[in-house]
């Protein structure tokens, strides 16, 4: 679009307000917020802006030519985004849950209506990972994308491992700093990372995998024994999202805590930062690193999505075009895990292909062994309800 | 371009051969090398390819629709690149020296002939820094770009600081590993970093600064005393390129060794890696990290430039458009430096605004003080001929 961007903004939470303040404090040529749709327009938000509680006021305002959607509710988000696409209004969204579930439909809609939807801000806070996968790592060299995609859980893990904070104190601090989503389970149980990983999978390998098919496990059940175990091995526990194309063109994806050794890039990703390691043939590894949570970094990422539209930038979804040669999703692989359990009965939930270590004491029992991703996935609910903690534990 | 890319390649040195091997080992859809122009076509290079020693054979071949220029000679490089632009053939170049001197002319030519020139591979090895500055950091939030842009000198510094190698042994190893340019002064005296910095300045801030106006100083004169000094302060010496927009809209650029403390991202950039810290309002700091030297990483970056043309990607040079508000280049600033000299007479070359530390012994003399960038620049030749070593030495 060559004319000015006049935004109809949905949502005035952390990121919505961040964007409002950014545009107020650092005026950006050709970009302004015309109207903001919130649930309760009468509430005093301490700012002078044109609020409404009706989506119609946004979509029917002839001044508005651009939609930015920054609300929590995934269903309402889809309504807004798909409506904007059908109206051929460029739209930027930060709703990863919605995207992770609705991407195939949204890609189709964009094509049908020749419209633009951007969402770099959704996947990795301020790191432009989607655009780099889309534009730069667009060849067959790409092997894997692996990273810390959730700033909130990483903040908590950092406080525990670096500052010796208790789990509870770290959680409280994260809440106080505004790093936790309104529903903390999203961050702590790996859902947020999972949704981002699904989006990344589309742009990295051209493959959409329904979130329900991808194993995710979080740090909710991690306790002091696990922390001590990691420390004794000179490792840190990080919540890692991972998508990798195997040599036989199968694609593996998962989100799982991992015992990370010092020689890994992501070992040093601290606090609310995100870090992504992109691995490929020839260029080996590249690492991108930046703030992954918080109002200001995320809103600056939203602004980059917005200004990209000034220059007609679109995701091309290039990799999806070669459907015959696309890698096939699988969870039929095994890997080495550390599993801490309370009751020996819990072990029945798992199918160890091999056991390397086994430890039992009053109150602390763990096993290190090789399990299949498929079997973990099948038992996820049960493992969760029995508060089993597990972490990938590679030998290197 | 929607059709296949049929490349006429100039140069078969480290990167040219790297690209050839990459396309041979990992065939890329729609991309092939048709002919390769080298100085001596009769020499046996151990590969089966269509060599020629005449540029005319490339430009007159109706099969060739794309030029990749990977030769050392800056003048010949400009000839080839400008000729391709005038023929409206997309062209990719890796020649940073040529680009740093000829960018304004090449930007004009591209506009006049509506042609495409890409050179992400020239600026930071495998890290896509130009494209990210161009596309993502395209707003007024950007404050500075600072980084290690030369893999060869960094390799040498790493071997000295981490492995305790002597300066000479590290240099020999770098040569053996193929990390040094044919003229090592380019790497060690900061010229290579300077050329890259000039290119980055154009895409980061829309400002072209002639390389002769930018102060650069290298690590050629660094000796064991300097290394010990850095170690005693728990710092490492890194060769840092830096461009920054000051609050009053002035632009500072320089390449200089720097005493880096542990809490900085670039402290940990080791071996032949490059690392770039991008700083801005709201998003704070982002860090990109990857291999910066060697045949394979650089040729993979060249491939990304090539495939981008399949999708009609072009640099827009957006930031240059707002000429009224562009920052103005200056070297009228002062900063804190460590200067090691042999003869007290050498100090006459510098104008210290303030002296913080002064040390003298038989054979080792240094001063820590505040000097102006302008005065350093004026004395560069003399400082170099007297083998003075200097390094920025910020307090943090």
Image: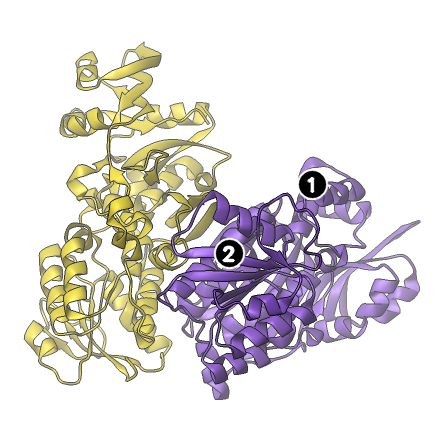
Chain colours: A purple, B yellow
The correct choice, above or below, for B340 with respect to A131 in the image is above
Q: Depth check: A383 or A127 in front?
A: A127
- Local secondary structure at mark 2: strand
Name the residue: 37% across, 64% down.
Answer: A3
Using the rendered image of the protein, determine whether residue A285 is visible from the camera's viewpoint: no
Q: Which numbered disc covers residue A221?
A: none
Q: Residue at x 46, y 48 (%)?
A: B287
The quarter holding residue B158 reads top left
Q: CA distance from mark 1 to mark 2?
A: 37 Å
Residue A360 image offset from top left, x and y in percent: 88, 53
Q: Which residue is mark 2?
A: A33
Residue A159 image label:
1
Crowding around mark 1 (Cα neighbors within 10 Å: few <14, some 14 to 19, many 20+) is: many
Residue A192, given in percent of the width and then of the height, sits at: 67, 61
Tell whether B210 sits left or right of A132: left
Image side of residue B28 versus residue A234, left or right: left
**Nearer to me, B289 or B366:** B289
Closer to the camera in the image, A19 or B186: A19
Quarter occupied by the N terminus of chain A: bottom left
């Amino acid at each position: 679009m060559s004319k000015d961007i006049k935004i109809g903004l949905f949502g005035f939470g952390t990121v919505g307000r961040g964007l409002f303040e950014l545009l107020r404090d650092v005026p950006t040529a050709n970009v302004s917020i015309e109207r903001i749709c919130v649930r309760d327009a009468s509430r005093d938000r301490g700012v002078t802006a044109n609020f409404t509680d009706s989506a119609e006021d946004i979509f029917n305002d002839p001044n508005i030519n651009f939609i930015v959607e920054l609300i929590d509710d995934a269903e309402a988000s889809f309504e807004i985004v798909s409506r904007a696409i059908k109206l051929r209004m460029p739209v930027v969204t930060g709703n990863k849950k919605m995207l992770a579930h609705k991407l195939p439909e949204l890609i189709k809609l964009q094509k049908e209506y020749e419209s633009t939807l951007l969402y770099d801000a959704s996947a990795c806070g301020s790191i432009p990972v989607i655009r780099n996968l889309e534009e730069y790592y667009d060849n067959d060299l790409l092997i894997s994308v692996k990273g810390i995609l959730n700033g909130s859980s990483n903040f908590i893990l950092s406080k525990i491992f670096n500052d010796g904070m208790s789990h509870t104190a770290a959680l409280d601090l994260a809440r106080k700093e505004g790093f936790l989503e309104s529903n903390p389970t999203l961050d702590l149980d790996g859902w947020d990372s999972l949704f981002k990983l699904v989006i990344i999978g589309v742009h990295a390998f051209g493959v959409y995998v329904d979130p329900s098919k991808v194993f995710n496990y979080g740090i909710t059940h991690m306790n002091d024994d696990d922390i001590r175990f990691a420390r004794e091995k000179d490792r840190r526990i990080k919540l890692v999202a991972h998508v990798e194309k195997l040599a036989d063109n199968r694609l593996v994806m998962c989100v799982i805590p991992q015992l990370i050794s010092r020689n890994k890039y992501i070992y040093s990703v601290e606090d609310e930062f995100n870090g992504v390691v992109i691995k490929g043939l020839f260029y080996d590894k590249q690492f991108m690193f930046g703030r992954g949570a918080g109002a200001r970094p995320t809103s600056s990422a939203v602004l980059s999505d917005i200004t990209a539209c000034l220059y007609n930038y679109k995701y091309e979804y290039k990799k999806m075009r070669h459907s015959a040669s696309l890698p096939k999703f699988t969870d039929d692989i095994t890997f080495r895990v550390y599993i801490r359990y309370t009751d020996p009965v819990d072990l029945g939930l798992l199918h160890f292909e091999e056991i390397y270590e086994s430890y039992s004491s009053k109150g602390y029992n763990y096993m290190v062994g090789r399990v299949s991703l498929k079997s973990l996935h099948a038992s996820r609910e049960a493992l969760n309800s029995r508060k089993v903690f597990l972490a990938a534990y590679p030998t290197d």
